[in-house]
Amino acid sequence: MSGTSVIDSHTYPLAFENIDTDQIIPAQFLTTTERAGLGRYCFYHWRYDDKGDPRADNPLGGYRAERHQVLVAGANFGCGSSREHAPWALLDFGVRAVISSQFADIFRNNALKNGLLPLQVEQSVVDFLLNRPDHPVRIDIAATRLQVPGLGTIDFPLDPFPAHCLARGIDQLDYILQHEPLIARHEQRHEY
Amino acid sequence: MSASPDAKTLFEKIWQQHLVKAESLAGGDDAPAIIYIDLHLLHEVTSPQAFAELRRRGLRVRCTDRCLATIDHSTPTLPPDANGHRPYVTEAAHQQVETLYRNCAEQGIELHGWDSPNRGIIHVMGPEMGATQPGMTIVCGDSHTATHGAFGALAFGIGTTEVGHVLATQCLLQRKPDTLGIRVEGPLQPGVSAKDVILHIIGRIGVDGGTGSVIEYYGSTIRAMDMEGRMTLCNMSIECGARAGMVAPDQVTFDYLQGRAMAPSGAAWDRAVQHWSTLTTDADARHDRQVEIDATGIEPSVTWGTHPGMVIGISENVPERQDGAGRDALDYMQLQAGSPLAGAPVDMVFIGSCTNSRLTDLRIVAAVLKNRKVAAGIRVLIVPGSEQTRRAAEDEGLDRIFLQAGAEWREPGCSMCIGMNGDIGQPGDLVVSTSNRNFKGRQGRNVRTVLASPLTAAACAVTGRVTDPRSFLEVQA
């Protein structure tokens, strides 16, 4: 999404359904007034124990930011709260795309606003990748195409508007501001 | 999707009334619709980066009179010390609150801070002040914004980038969601409340059963609910993944609103009621999907697992789940499949949150705790939803009942629902909670949360075990 429109990476599997935003970034780290530097808190309780020491059973133990820009996760990824800190934390952690069969609405929205790709595919594709950790993939965002060696090429759905904005350098807030006359007219017409 | 061309759902009416610009046709820029937002609720956690973005761009807030702000998530629920210092969990939490003060002052936004008689959980305060009204579009950087749908408003949570969009333009880019009709029919059994109904519904349709949709709840059970019950119901719409939940306004809605500070009055009230009365789903209109719920069969409901879709009736056994998620949840919760949840020892009870912290909830809890004691070794935290609720409860003497029973009576805030302010359980604690999420670690590291109604939570507080609250109804009768 951000920068180049092709991601060449290896996948990192998280074989859990319903990974909620409290897992992605626990609420105790939401007292920040910044959006930078949240990667250190990403999946914090999974990575660290009560004392802040690394956990031996950390599901992200083998994760390497320079190698794994793509997470593969069970259905309903990002359910729960509206915290945009979740995509901020994932991006800062090194993740550029999450592959799942289903995303929670607000998470998907927040991810797209920040250049994190929520890549939705059939569960069979997810299962293929969950069974093959550290699998190479190529994601062509402009073509909305995922290439999985050993499985094939899979088209994925993507709201065309964020892609359109990125391709043409359109800022979404500026886009709304361009419609100011329509907003003003609405305000004049409606009492409620 | 409508059976007759002119027939519209409640959602479609509100959507159309707020369209600044319709969705573009595919092939052009494929732009989402631009919809107007009538009321923007703000709190300290999800707004600082949005205000910073406005500053970076040199923009001002477009409509300060459509913003309403309070402090609720990071705020301590214990009173200030002798020197007036509030016991913030961290300096960062303190600074987050101070940042909202500065941002609101700079932009001219009404903030209900420490000195306001209205301060409270944003989703409790808005309705109490009469700011929440039928037919409105309402957003907040908080997923439980769905609460306000109880008034027949289209209310949903947004991220911080979108908070910035609304601050600057009073608008949002939105794809039109589908609608899901959930019809609930029949009288509720004694001891069964709106909380049990919504837990039952989420258990039935699943934690992702509403994804992509706006839910409209209707039917005789919903009509019979008071506004507090409808708020509890709509509040948890997000827990089945829905964008929003709504109930068409009726006389119950109007009676609740009349006379509240921000509600219209005089001739404007009459005009408003006339408009609000049109906000129903037309007889010929159809929802995209439909679910039927028989309310007469609903028991007091509780969660047994680690998301709000893992629900059983209190008399049922914890289900046998062979899948990974089920086994993982049982492992975390330290529960046995095939065994009852009732009887499990409880360490802590939390009464509060935007789901269940209103006066009606507190009255139910007080009725159970009156002339009783909290079970030995159990900690019970009772946190009113707002200053208005706190005063009303204290005027009725509910605080004395709670304190005499051995419970803690705190100042308003989100408290243990999200645990951001330091109100959390100890590792391994089993917490029976009237809040909305039982995710792992939500109420403290390794804390095991059982979601329940205020009545069930109060019964658990007295017995010290997960308890069918209906035994308390019989004793009282």
Image (tube, coloured by chain):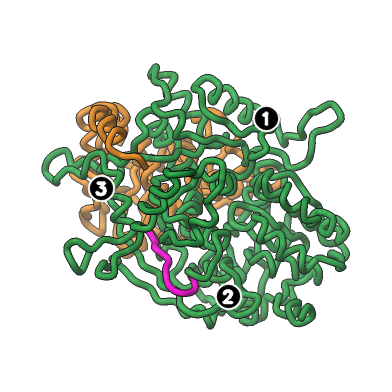
What is the chain identity of the residue bearing mark 3? A
What residue lies at 43% left-to-right and 54% top-to-bottom? Answer: A77
Chain shown in green: B
Please, what is the three-letter code of the amino acid marked with disc 3?
Answer: Leu
Q: Nearer the viewer, residue A65 or B277?
A: B277
The residue that disc 2 covers is B312
* Label 3 Cα neighbours within 10 Å, binned few <14 / some 14-19 / many ≥20: some
Which chain, by letter, is orange? Answer: A
The residue sitting at 76% across, 32% down in the picture is B86
Which residue is pictured at 72% across the width and 39% down the height? Answer: B76
Tell me how far mark 1 sits from mark 3, CA to CA. 40 Å
Q: Tell me if residue B220 is in the magenta stretch.
A: yes
Taking the view exactly as shown, the residue that stands out farthest to the top is: B58
The C terminus of chain B lies in quadrant: bottom right
As measured in the structure, the alpha-carbon distance from the residue carrying label 2 to the one carrying label 3 is 37 Å
- Between B68 and B241, the residue placed more toward the observer is B68
Disc 2 on helix, strand or loop?
A: strand
Query: What SS does tag 3 mark?
Result: loop
Instruction: Point out residue A65 in the picture as x, y percentages from the top left corner.
Output: 45, 38
**Magenta region, residue range:** B211-222
**In the rendered structure, does residue A102 fall within the stretch colored magenta?**
no
From the image, tell me which residue sits under label 3: A158
Question: Does the rendering let one see residue B469?
Answer: yes
As drawn, the label of residue B94 is: 1
Of B16 and A60, nearer the camera is: B16
Q: Residue at x 62, y 70 (%)?
A: B302
Identify the mark nearer the N-term, 2 or 1.
1
Q: Amino acid at mark 2?
A: Ile
- The type of residue carrying mark 1 is His
